Amino acid sequence: MAADRISSSLRPRASVLAATLGLLFGGVSMVQAQSLQELYDAARAYDASYLAARAQAESAEFKAGQADALARPTLGAGTSVYKTQTHTPSYGAVSAAGPVTVPAATMNSTATQIGLSAKYSVYNRGNSVTIEQAQRGLGVARADLESAEQDLIVRVAQAYFDVLNARDTLATAQGNKKAVAEQLASAKRNFEVGTATITDTREAQARYDLATAQELAADNDLRVKQVTLDQIVGRVGVDPKPLAQPVALPALASDQVETWVSQSEQHPVIRKAQLGLEVARLETEKAKAANGPTVEANGSLGVVNNRGDVQIPGSTRQAKVGLELNIPLYTGGYNDNRIKETLKLEEKSRNDLDFARRSISEATKRAFFGVQSLRAQVKAYEAAEASTKLALEATQLGYKLGVRVNLDVLNAQTQLFSTQRDLAKARYDVVLNSLKLRQAAGQLRPEDLAAVNALLAK
Protein backbone atom coordinates (compact mmCIF):
# COMPACT_ATOMS: atom_id res chain seq x y z
CA MET A 1 0.00 0.00 0.00
CA ALA A 2 2.84 2.39 0.83
CA ALA A 3 4.39 1.67 -2.54
CA ASP A 4 1.05 2.35 -4.22
CA ARG A 5 0.76 5.70 -2.43
CA ILE A 6 4.31 6.62 -3.45
CA SER A 7 3.65 5.56 -7.04
CA SER A 8 0.47 7.63 -7.20
CA SER A 9 2.31 10.64 -5.78
CA LEU A 10 4.90 10.33 -8.54
CA ARG A 11 2.35 10.28 -11.35
CA PRO A 12 1.63 14.05 -11.35
CA ARG A 13 5.30 14.90 -11.51
CA ALA A 14 5.95 12.29 -14.22
CA SER A 15 3.00 13.58 -16.21
CA VAL A 16 4.29 17.14 -15.90
CA LEU A 17 7.72 15.99 -17.08
CA ALA A 18 6.22 14.06 -19.99
CA ALA A 19 4.15 17.08 -21.00
CA THR A 20 7.25 19.28 -20.85
CA LEU A 21 9.20 16.91 -23.08
CA GLY A 22 6.27 16.75 -25.46
CA LEU A 23 6.29 20.52 -25.79
CA LEU A 24 10.04 20.50 -26.31
CA PHE A 25 10.16 18.02 -29.16
CA GLY A 26 6.59 17.64 -30.28
CA GLY A 27 6.69 20.81 -32.36
CA VAL A 28 4.61 23.90 -31.74
CA SER A 29 2.35 25.17 -34.48
CA MET A 30 4.10 28.08 -36.17
CA VAL A 31 2.35 31.17 -37.41
CA GLN A 32 3.43 31.86 -40.98
CA ALA A 33 6.41 29.55 -40.60
CA GLN A 34 8.58 29.11 -43.70
CA SER A 35 9.66 25.84 -45.21
CA LEU A 36 13.18 25.10 -46.37
CA GLN A 37 12.10 25.39 -50.02
CA GLU A 38 10.61 28.85 -49.43
CA LEU A 39 13.76 30.12 -47.74
CA TYR A 40 15.98 28.65 -50.46
CA ASP A 41 13.95 30.45 -53.12
CA ALA A 42 14.38 33.69 -51.15
CA ALA A 43 18.13 33.10 -50.83
CA ARG A 44 18.50 32.56 -54.58
CA ALA A 45 17.26 36.08 -55.14
CA TYR A 46 19.31 37.64 -52.32
CA ASP A 47 22.55 35.81 -51.59
CA ALA A 48 25.41 37.88 -52.98
CA SER A 49 27.87 35.02 -53.57
CA TYR A 50 25.31 33.03 -55.59
CA LEU A 51 24.23 36.07 -57.59
CA ALA A 52 27.89 36.83 -58.33
CA ALA A 53 28.43 33.27 -59.61
CA ARG A 54 25.32 33.53 -61.76
CA ALA A 55 26.48 36.84 -63.25
CA GLN A 56 29.90 35.30 -63.93
CA ALA A 57 28.28 32.37 -65.75
CA GLU A 58 26.13 34.70 -67.82
CA SER A 59 29.16 36.81 -68.75
CA ALA A 60 30.95 33.68 -70.01
CA GLU A 61 28.31 33.32 -72.73
CA PHE A 62 29.21 36.74 -74.08
CA LYS A 63 32.91 35.96 -73.83
CA ALA A 64 32.33 32.87 -75.96
CA GLY A 65 30.48 35.08 -78.44
CA GLN A 66 33.55 37.32 -78.66
CA ALA A 67 35.68 34.32 -79.59
CA ASP A 68 33.16 33.22 -82.22
CA ALA A 69 33.72 36.57 -83.96
CA LEU A 70 37.21 35.38 -84.96
CA ALA A 71 35.62 33.06 -87.51
CA ARG A 72 33.56 35.82 -89.11
CA PRO A 73 34.57 38.62 -91.49
CA THR A 74 34.99 42.18 -90.29
CA LEU A 75 33.75 45.21 -92.19
CA GLY A 76 34.65 48.83 -91.57
CA ALA A 77 33.89 52.21 -93.09
CA GLY A 78 36.17 55.21 -93.11
CA THR A 79 36.42 58.70 -94.51
CA SER A 80 39.13 61.31 -94.65
CA VAL A 81 39.55 64.87 -95.93
CA TYR A 82 42.94 66.34 -96.88
CA LYS A 83 43.52 69.99 -97.79
CA THR A 84 46.80 70.72 -99.64
CA GLN A 85 48.39 74.10 -100.33
CA THR A 86 51.47 74.36 -102.63
CA HIS A 87 53.45 77.61 -102.93
CA THR A 88 56.07 78.10 -105.67
CA PRO A 89 58.37 81.17 -105.60
CA SER A 90 59.10 83.32 -108.66
CA TYR A 91 62.01 82.28 -110.84
CA GLY A 92 63.71 83.29 -114.03
CA ALA A 93 63.42 81.43 -117.29
CA VAL A 94 64.56 81.78 -120.88
CA SER A 95 62.02 81.73 -123.64
CA ALA A 96 62.19 82.30 -127.41
CA ALA A 97 61.47 85.96 -126.79
CA GLY A 98 64.27 86.21 -124.33
CA PRO A 99 64.62 86.07 -120.55
CA VAL A 100 61.33 86.13 -118.58
CA THR A 101 60.36 86.02 -114.89
CA VAL A 102 57.81 83.47 -113.77
CA PRO A 103 55.81 85.02 -110.93
CA ALA A 104 55.20 83.22 -107.59
CA ALA A 105 52.06 81.04 -107.42
CA THR A 106 49.90 79.35 -104.80
CA MET A 107 47.78 76.26 -105.56
CA ASN A 108 45.06 74.88 -103.27
CA SER A 109 43.45 71.44 -103.53
CA THR A 110 41.05 69.32 -101.42
CA ALA A 111 40.86 65.50 -101.52
CA THR A 112 37.91 63.71 -99.91
CA GLN A 113 38.04 59.93 -99.55
CA ILE A 114 35.24 57.56 -98.52
CA GLY A 115 35.67 53.80 -98.45
CA LEU A 116 34.84 50.34 -97.06
CA SER A 117 37.39 47.79 -95.93
CA ALA A 118 36.86 44.11 -95.11
CA LYS A 119 38.99 41.34 -93.63
CA TYR A 120 38.42 37.62 -93.33
CA SER A 121 40.69 35.01 -91.83
CA VAL A 122 40.80 32.28 -94.44
CA TYR A 123 43.09 30.05 -92.37
CA ASN A 124 44.31 30.64 -88.83
CA ARG A 125 44.55 27.58 -86.63
CA GLY A 126 45.18 29.75 -83.56
CA ASN A 127 41.80 31.43 -83.98
CA SER A 128 40.03 28.07 -84.27
CA VAL A 129 41.67 26.88 -81.05
CA THR A 130 40.71 30.10 -79.27
CA ILE A 131 37.07 29.49 -80.21
CA GLU A 132 37.24 25.95 -78.81
CA GLN A 133 38.82 27.26 -75.61
CA ALA A 134 36.00 29.77 -75.20
CA GLN A 135 33.46 26.95 -75.38
CA ARG A 136 35.36 25.08 -72.67
CA GLY A 137 35.41 28.28 -70.64
CA LEU A 138 31.65 28.43 -70.91
CA GLY A 139 31.48 24.91 -69.48
CA VAL A 140 33.77 25.95 -66.62
CA ALA A 141 31.48 28.87 -65.77
CA ARG A 142 28.45 26.57 -65.74
CA ALA A 143 30.26 24.15 -63.44
CA ASP A 144 31.11 27.03 -61.10
CA LEU A 145 27.47 28.09 -61.09
CA GLU A 146 26.37 24.55 -60.25
CA SER A 147 28.88 24.46 -57.38
CA ALA A 148 27.58 27.81 -56.11
CA GLU A 149 24.01 26.52 -56.29
CA GLN A 150 24.89 23.38 -54.32
CA ASP A 151 26.78 25.48 -51.79
CA LEU A 152 23.76 27.76 -51.37
CA ILE A 153 21.47 24.78 -50.75
CA VAL A 154 23.78 23.45 -48.05
CA ARG A 155 24.29 26.87 -46.44
CA VAL A 156 20.57 27.54 -46.27
CA ALA A 157 19.88 24.04 -44.91
CA GLN A 158 22.71 24.41 -42.38
CA ALA A 159 21.37 27.72 -41.11
CA TYR A 160 17.80 26.38 -41.14
CA PHE A 161 18.52 23.34 -39.00
CA ASP A 162 20.94 25.29 -36.81
CA VAL A 163 18.03 27.49 -35.78
CA LEU A 164 15.79 24.48 -35.12
CA ASN A 165 18.53 22.79 -33.11
CA ALA A 166 19.19 25.98 -31.14
CA ARG A 167 15.49 26.20 -30.35
CA ASP A 168 15.45 22.63 -29.07
CA THR A 169 18.59 23.26 -27.06
CA LEU A 170 17.01 26.33 -25.45
CA ALA A 171 13.80 24.43 -24.75
CA THR A 172 15.85 21.61 -23.23
CA ALA A 173 17.75 24.06 -21.02
CA GLN A 174 14.50 25.67 -19.91
CA GLY A 175 12.88 22.30 -19.20
CA ASN A 176 15.94 21.17 -17.28
CA LYS A 177 15.94 24.38 -15.27
CA LYS A 178 12.26 23.96 -14.44
CA ALA A 179 12.76 20.36 -13.32
CA VAL A 180 15.78 21.34 -11.19
CA ALA A 181 13.76 24.17 -9.66
CA GLU A 182 11.09 21.69 -8.61
CA GLN A 183 13.71 19.41 -7.12
CA LEU A 184 15.27 22.40 -5.32
CA ALA A 185 11.91 23.32 -3.82
CA SER A 186 11.38 19.71 -2.74
CA ALA A 187 14.84 19.61 -1.12
CA LYS A 188 14.12 22.81 0.80
CA ARG A 189 10.78 21.46 2.06
CA ASN A 190 12.36 18.19 3.14
CA PHE A 191 15.13 20.08 4.94
CA GLU A 192 12.60 22.24 6.77
CA VAL A 193 10.69 19.21 8.04
CA GLY A 194 13.93 17.45 8.91
CA THR A 195 13.75 14.56 6.44
CA ALA A 196 16.80 15.70 4.43
CA THR A 197 20.12 17.38 5.04
CA ILE A 198 21.29 20.78 3.89
CA THR A 199 23.54 18.95 1.42
CA ASP A 200 20.54 18.09 -0.77
CA THR A 201 19.50 21.72 -0.88
CA ARG A 202 22.97 22.96 -1.75
CA GLU A 203 23.41 20.34 -4.46
CA ALA A 204 20.07 21.31 -5.98
CA GLN A 205 20.95 25.02 -5.74
CA ALA A 206 24.28 24.45 -7.49
CA ARG A 207 22.56 22.46 -10.24
CA TYR A 208 19.92 25.21 -10.58
CA ASP A 209 22.59 27.90 -10.98
CA LEU A 210 24.30 25.79 -13.65
CA ALA A 211 20.99 25.28 -15.45
CA THR A 212 20.46 29.06 -15.44
CA ALA A 213 23.85 29.61 -17.05
CA GLN A 214 23.12 26.95 -19.66
CA GLU A 215 19.79 28.59 -20.45
CA LEU A 216 21.47 31.97 -21.01
CA ALA A 217 24.08 30.41 -23.29
CA ALA A 218 21.40 28.56 -25.26
CA ASP A 219 19.34 31.75 -25.65
CA ASN A 220 22.33 33.64 -27.01
CA ASP A 221 23.20 30.80 -29.37
CA LEU A 222 19.65 30.87 -30.76
CA ARG A 223 19.91 34.61 -31.39
CA VAL A 224 23.19 34.15 -33.27
CA LYS A 225 21.85 31.28 -35.37
CA GLN A 226 18.73 33.32 -36.16
CA VAL A 227 20.84 36.24 -37.37
CA THR A 228 22.78 33.92 -39.67
CA LEU A 229 19.62 32.51 -41.23
CA ASP A 230 18.11 35.99 -41.66
CA GLN A 231 21.26 37.20 -43.36
CA ILE A 232 21.33 34.36 -45.89
CA VAL A 233 17.70 34.74 -47.00
CA GLY A 234 17.49 38.52 -46.70
CA ARG A 235 14.60 38.56 -44.23
CA VAL A 236 14.12 39.48 -40.58
CA GLY A 237 12.63 37.18 -37.98
CA VAL A 238 12.56 34.05 -40.15
CA ASP A 239 10.48 31.31 -38.54
CA PRO A 240 11.50 27.88 -39.92
CA LYS A 241 9.10 24.98 -39.74
CA PRO A 242 10.16 22.18 -37.37
CA LEU A 243 10.34 18.50 -38.26
CA ALA A 244 6.99 16.74 -38.21
CA GLN A 245 6.35 14.35 -35.34
CA PRO A 246 7.00 11.49 -35.27
CA VAL A 247 10.21 12.13 -37.19
CA ALA A 248 10.72 9.98 -40.30
CA LEU A 249 14.29 10.22 -41.50
CA PRO A 250 14.93 10.11 -45.27
CA ALA A 251 16.33 6.92 -46.74
CA LEU A 252 19.52 6.98 -48.80
CA ALA A 253 19.29 6.35 -52.52
CA SER A 254 21.92 3.62 -52.11
CA ASP A 255 23.48 1.86 -49.14
CA GLN A 256 26.67 1.12 -51.10
CA VAL A 257 29.48 3.64 -50.84
CA GLU A 258 30.92 2.67 -54.21
CA THR A 259 27.66 3.64 -55.88
CA TRP A 260 28.02 7.15 -54.53
CA VAL A 261 31.68 7.33 -55.50
CA SER A 262 30.93 6.23 -59.07
CA GLN A 263 28.36 9.01 -59.41
CA SER A 264 30.89 11.63 -58.33
CA GLU A 265 32.52 11.69 -61.79
CA GLN A 266 29.86 14.24 -62.76
CA HIS A 267 30.76 16.46 -59.82
CA PRO A 268 31.10 20.10 -60.98
CA VAL A 269 34.58 20.31 -59.46
CA ILE A 270 35.72 17.29 -61.50
CA ARG A 271 34.03 18.62 -64.63
CA LYS A 272 35.79 21.94 -64.13
CA ALA A 273 39.17 20.23 -63.74
CA GLN A 274 38.48 18.09 -66.83
CA LEU A 275 37.63 21.19 -68.84
CA GLY A 276 40.74 22.86 -67.47
CA LEU A 277 42.85 20.02 -68.84
CA GLU A 278 41.16 20.32 -72.24
CA VAL A 279 41.84 24.07 -72.26
CA ALA A 280 45.49 23.42 -71.42
CA ARG A 281 45.78 20.93 -74.29
CA LEU A 282 44.23 23.43 -76.66
CA GLU A 283 46.67 26.07 -75.42
CA THR A 284 49.52 23.76 -76.37
CA GLU A 285 47.97 23.27 -79.79
CA LYS A 286 47.60 27.02 -80.19
CA ALA A 287 51.25 27.54 -79.26
CA LYS A 288 52.30 25.02 -81.91
CA ALA A 289 50.00 26.67 -84.45
CA ALA A 290 51.95 29.92 -84.01
CA ASN A 291 54.71 28.32 -86.09
CA GLY A 292 52.31 27.64 -88.96
CA PRO A 293 51.06 29.83 -91.80
CA THR A 294 48.06 32.14 -91.73
CA VAL A 295 46.02 33.30 -94.70
CA GLU A 296 43.91 36.44 -94.62
CA ALA A 297 41.70 37.94 -97.31
CA ASN A 298 41.56 41.73 -97.58
CA GLY A 299 39.36 43.93 -99.66
CA SER A 300 38.58 47.63 -99.95
CA LEU A 301 36.29 49.84 -102.00
CA GLY A 302 36.57 53.62 -102.02
CA VAL A 303 35.92 56.90 -103.77
CA VAL A 304 38.37 59.85 -103.88
CA ASN A 305 37.11 63.29 -104.87
CA ASN A 306 39.71 65.94 -105.84
CA ARG A 307 38.81 69.60 -106.05
CA GLY A 308 40.78 72.79 -106.58
CA ASP A 309 44.07 73.25 -108.41
CA VAL A 310 44.59 69.65 -109.51
CA GLN A 311 45.47 68.12 -112.83
CA ILE A 312 42.48 65.72 -112.84
CA PRO A 313 39.55 67.11 -110.87
CA GLY A 314 36.51 65.01 -109.99
CA SER A 315 35.94 61.58 -108.42
CA THR A 316 38.05 58.48 -108.74
CA ARG A 317 36.86 55.01 -107.69
CA GLN A 318 39.17 52.34 -106.31
CA ALA A 319 38.58 48.64 -105.58
CA LYS A 320 41.13 46.20 -104.19
CA VAL A 321 40.98 42.50 -103.25
CA GLY A 322 43.89 40.37 -102.14
CA LEU A 323 45.18 37.45 -100.07
CA GLU A 324 47.88 37.81 -97.45
CA LEU A 325 50.05 34.86 -96.48
CA ASN A 326 52.22 35.02 -93.37
CA ILE A 327 54.78 32.41 -92.37
CA PRO A 328 56.90 32.99 -89.25
CA LEU A 329 60.54 32.10 -89.95
CA TYR A 330 62.31 33.12 -86.76
CA THR A 331 60.85 34.47 -83.49
CA GLY A 332 63.96 34.53 -81.34
CA GLY A 333 62.94 31.36 -79.51
CA TYR A 334 59.61 32.78 -78.32
CA ASN A 335 57.40 30.11 -79.88
CA ASP A 336 59.59 27.20 -78.79
CA ASN A 337 59.62 28.36 -75.19
CA ARG A 338 55.90 29.05 -75.31
CA ILE A 339 55.28 25.44 -76.38
CA LYS A 340 57.44 24.13 -73.53
CA GLU A 341 55.54 26.33 -71.07
CA THR A 342 52.14 25.08 -72.22
CA LEU A 343 53.28 21.45 -71.99
CA LYS A 344 54.18 21.99 -68.33
CA LEU A 345 50.86 23.74 -67.71
CA GLU A 346 49.12 20.79 -69.34
CA GLU A 347 50.91 18.48 -66.92
CA LYS A 348 49.76 20.69 -64.04
CA SER A 349 46.15 20.52 -65.22
CA ARG A 350 46.37 16.74 -65.47
CA ASN A 351 47.57 16.54 -61.87
CA ASP A 352 44.84 18.98 -60.80
CA LEU A 353 42.27 16.64 -62.33
CA ASP A 354 43.71 13.63 -60.51
CA PHE A 355 43.68 15.59 -57.24
CA ALA A 356 40.06 16.65 -57.79
CA ARG A 357 38.96 13.07 -58.41
CA ARG A 358 40.76 11.78 -55.33
CA SER A 359 39.47 14.60 -53.14
CA ILE A 360 35.87 14.15 -54.28
CA SER A 361 36.11 10.39 -53.77
CA GLU A 362 37.47 10.89 -50.26
CA ALA A 363 34.86 13.53 -49.40
CA THR A 364 32.05 11.30 -50.72
CA LYS A 365 33.20 8.36 -48.62
CA ARG A 366 33.52 10.53 -45.51
CA ALA A 367 30.05 11.96 -46.06
CA PHE A 368 28.54 8.51 -46.67
CA PHE A 369 30.02 6.97 -43.54
CA GLY A 370 29.06 10.07 -41.58
CA VAL A 371 25.41 9.68 -42.57
CA GLN A 372 25.47 5.97 -41.81
CA SER A 373 26.92 6.68 -38.37
CA LEU A 374 24.38 9.41 -37.64
CA ARG A 375 21.48 7.14 -38.59
CA ALA A 376 22.80 4.52 -36.17
CA GLN A 377 23.23 7.19 -33.50
CA VAL A 378 19.59 8.24 -33.89
CA LYS A 379 18.46 4.69 -33.21
CA ALA A 380 20.78 4.49 -30.21
CA TYR A 381 19.55 7.82 -28.83
CA GLU A 382 15.93 6.74 -29.27
CA ALA A 383 16.65 3.63 -27.22
CA ALA A 384 18.56 5.74 -24.68
CA GLU A 385 15.63 8.15 -24.41
CA ALA A 386 13.22 5.37 -23.51
CA SER A 387 15.59 3.78 -21.01
CA THR A 388 16.52 7.16 -19.48
CA LYS A 389 12.85 7.96 -18.85
CA LEU A 390 12.46 4.68 -17.04
CA ALA A 391 15.67 5.34 -15.10
CA LEU A 392 14.38 8.77 -14.01
CA GLU A 393 11.07 7.32 -12.80
CA ALA A 394 12.91 4.59 -10.87
CA THR A 395 15.31 7.13 -9.33
CA GLN A 396 12.42 9.36 -8.26
CA LEU A 397 10.74 6.38 -6.67
CA GLY A 398 13.94 5.42 -4.90
CA TYR A 399 14.29 8.98 -3.61
CA LYS A 400 10.81 8.79 -2.12
CA LEU A 401 11.66 5.47 -0.51
CA GLY A 402 14.90 6.84 0.86
CA VAL A 403 17.24 4.57 -1.09
CA ARG A 404 18.28 7.36 -3.47
CA VAL A 405 19.61 10.83 -2.69
CA ASN A 406 18.67 14.14 -4.24
CA LEU A 407 21.82 14.19 -6.38
CA ASP A 408 20.75 10.93 -8.03
CA VAL A 409 17.48 12.53 -9.11
CA LEU A 410 19.25 15.62 -10.44
CA ASN A 411 21.67 13.50 -12.42
CA ALA A 412 18.84 11.40 -13.86
CA GLN A 413 16.93 14.53 -14.89
CA THR A 414 20.00 16.02 -16.53
CA GLN A 415 20.70 12.75 -18.33
CA LEU A 416 17.18 12.65 -19.73
CA PHE A 417 17.24 16.20 -21.03
CA SER A 418 20.73 15.75 -22.47
CA THR A 419 19.60 12.62 -24.29
CA GLN A 420 16.56 14.44 -25.68
CA ARG A 421 18.78 17.28 -26.87
CA ASP A 422 21.33 14.97 -28.48
CA LEU A 423 18.58 12.95 -30.17
CA ALA A 424 17.08 16.08 -31.73
CA LYS A 425 20.49 17.23 -32.95
CA ALA A 426 21.30 13.80 -34.40
CA ARG A 427 18.04 13.86 -36.38
CA TYR A 428 18.84 17.29 -37.81
CA ASP A 429 22.34 16.11 -38.64
CA VAL A 430 21.00 13.12 -40.56
CA VAL A 431 18.82 15.34 -42.75
CA LEU A 432 21.54 17.92 -43.26
CA ASN A 433 24.32 15.44 -43.91
CA SER A 434 22.15 13.58 -46.41
CA LEU A 435 22.17 16.79 -48.44
CA LYS A 436 25.92 17.13 -47.90
CA LEU A 437 26.40 13.57 -49.14
CA ARG A 438 24.61 14.43 -52.37
CA GLN A 439 26.74 17.56 -52.63
CA ALA A 440 29.94 15.55 -52.08
CA ALA A 441 28.89 13.18 -54.87
CA GLY A 442 27.89 16.07 -57.14
CA GLN A 443 24.25 14.93 -57.19
CA LEU A 444 22.63 17.74 -55.17
CA ARG A 445 19.86 19.59 -57.01
CA PRO A 446 17.26 22.16 -55.90
CA GLU A 447 14.61 19.48 -56.49
CA ASP A 448 16.09 17.48 -53.59
CA LEU A 449 14.67 20.03 -51.16
CA ALA A 450 11.17 18.70 -51.90
CA ALA A 451 12.05 15.48 -50.04
CA VAL A 452 13.25 17.50 -47.03
CA ASN A 453 10.13 19.67 -47.12
CA ALA A 454 8.03 16.50 -46.79
CA LEU A 455 9.66 15.90 -43.38
CA LEU A 456 8.58 19.29 -42.01
CA ALA A 457 5.45 20.09 -40.08
CA LYS A 458 2.58 21.31 -42.22
Image: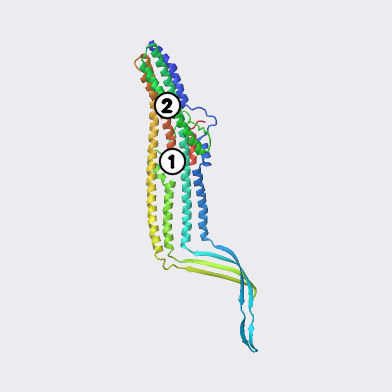
Q: Disc 1 or disc 2, which is closer to the eye?
A: 2
The spot of residue 261 in percent (x, y) is 39, 43
- Reading the image, the residue beneath label 2 is 213
Q: Mark 1: few, some, or many residues within 10 Å (few <14, many ≥20)?
A: many
Is residue 92 visible to the viewer in this orientation of the structure? yes
Percent position of residue 359, x then y = 38, 45
Q: Quadrant of residue 314?
A: bottom right
Left or right? Give the position of 240 relative to 213: right
Q: Which mark is residue 438?
A: 1
Alpha-carbon neighbours of circle 2 within 10 Å: few (<14), some, or many (≥20)? some
Q: Is residue 114 above or below residue 266?
A: below
Cα gap from disc 1 to disc 2, whole angstroms: 38 Å
The residue depicted at 52 percent of the width and 67 percent of the height is: 297
Above-or-below relation of 187 to 355: above
Residue 286 location, quadrant: bottom left
Front residue (pair 394, 208): 208
- Give the percent coordinates (x, y) of residue 354: 37, 49
Name the N-terminal-most of marks 1 and 2: 2
